[in-house]
Image (tube, helix red, strand yellow):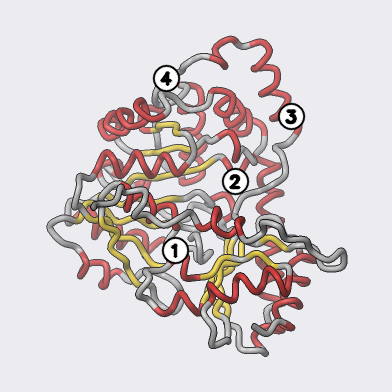
Amino acid sequence: MSMSRTRSTFVSPIVEAYSWLDGMTFPSDRPLLNVSQAAPIDPPPEGLRQAMAESALNDNSAHLYGAVLGRNDLRTGLAAQISAHYDAEVSGDQIGITSGCNQAFAATIASLCEDGDEVIIPAPWYFNHKMWLDMSGVSAVPLMVDPDMRPDIDKAAALISARTRAIALVSPNNPCGTEYPADLLRAFYDLAKSNGLALILDETYRDFDSRSGPPHQLLQLPDWDQTLIHLYSFSKAYRLTGHRVGAIATSPAQLIEMGKFIDTVTICPNQLGQIGALWGIENLSDWVAGERDEILDRRAAIHEGFAILAERGWKLLGCGAYFAYVEHPFTQDSADIARKLVTDASILMLPGSMFMPSDDPAGARQFRIAFANVDRAGIDELFHRLASFQP
């Protein structure tokens, strides 16, 4: 008997990890350190919430179906912000608004692929990308990364087949935190273009990139929208996670195809979330810069404090945006260690096996640390607990 695609797709790692907390209590002197999820838990700034509240009370359109590809003012506003950020010229008709960046990826795959097609994704991968490809009947072809956790362009070229439709990258990377250099992204763009493929570039964490100036020049290229599909999320920059607002930048023709998917699944993006996102674009640039400074300080704290773990055989493989990706020194599998960390150290952390092919042994040696909600003091406490932990 055949299985449905959802039954043959693994359970979301976040859902699985949170199940480990069922029935758990933690000592008052050792509260839970949750470094499993890369989402801010604080609410948006008060001004943004006030703007959304006023719209809920006074703007009848905020409660109605809207345009499938999003409100025109937000599409235009995001196009202007992207143009400034990347020193490019992007127009509103090249922007589509989605119900979160996961839907942006789902709509992209739906517009590109049919059953049996292939998409190349670096491993370690963002697990929701892998889950959606599995549920879509599209083969996720793993592209191994180098010791710096960057995808290898020659290995990618060797993986292209007659069924390949796209290469999907995330920069800054989830789960590794790695910021892909501009010349590497250009090499992948050229590889995709020369083979008639789409380059999907998820830049959900671009607001927390440590580099100044445009992180790449792809959006400056002529006819970029014939190859590049740029994905973005408002969830991280403006703390709008529960309102599900993401975005796509690509050609108007490709957006029409994506719109068929969006219209069928959600009809339109969340209206109040879009109103909040536009308010954020227009009013929160300084505030977001402060948030970036805080995340960069936590990144620095990871590097500065990691020596206590390095002395015990841990390795820091990647670090940036909301993430550090590490290798542990133990003989046990990371999946088993992860459960023991909950009970013995009050740490909830995702094992690398959740980001890797099941037959790749590297995942058993790795963990992702998501520090979106852990400050310097929390990072110091995390490292001391890990340093004293024995499975």
Hey, what amino acid is under mark 3? Gly
Query: Height in image: 341 above or below 80?
Result: below
Name which of mark 3 and mark 1 comes first in the sequence.
3
Name which of mark 4 and mark 3 comes first in the sequence.
3
Say which of marks 4 and 3 sits in front.
4
Name which of mark 4 and mark 2 comes first in the sequence.
4
Kind of element beneath mark 2: helix
Residue 386 picture location, percent across and down:
70, 78
Query: Can you identify the residue that label 2 sits on?
Result: 236
Q: Which mark is residue 47?
A: 3
Is residue 328 toward the left or the right of residue 292 in the image? left
Q: Nearer the viewer, residue 20 or 270?
A: 20
* Label 3 crowd (10 A; few <14 / some 14-19 / many >=20): some
Say which of marks 2 and 1 sits in front.
2
- Whether pointer 4 and pointer 3 mark residues with C-beta atoms closer than 8 Å, the reply is no
Name which of mark 1 and mark 4 comes first in the sequence.
4
* Label 2 crowd (10 A; few <14 / some 14-19 / many >=20): many
Kind of element beneath mark 1: loop
| Residue located at (47% from left, 65% from top) | 354
How far is the residue under mark 1 from the one under mark 4? Answer: 34 Å
| Residue located at (40% from left, 32% from top) | 95
Hey, what amino acid is under mark 1? Tyr
Residue 299 picture location, percent across and down:
65, 66
Query: Can you identify the residue that label 4 sits on?
Result: 67
Hey, what amino acid is under mark 2? Lys
Query: Can you identify the residue that label 1 sits on?
Result: 180
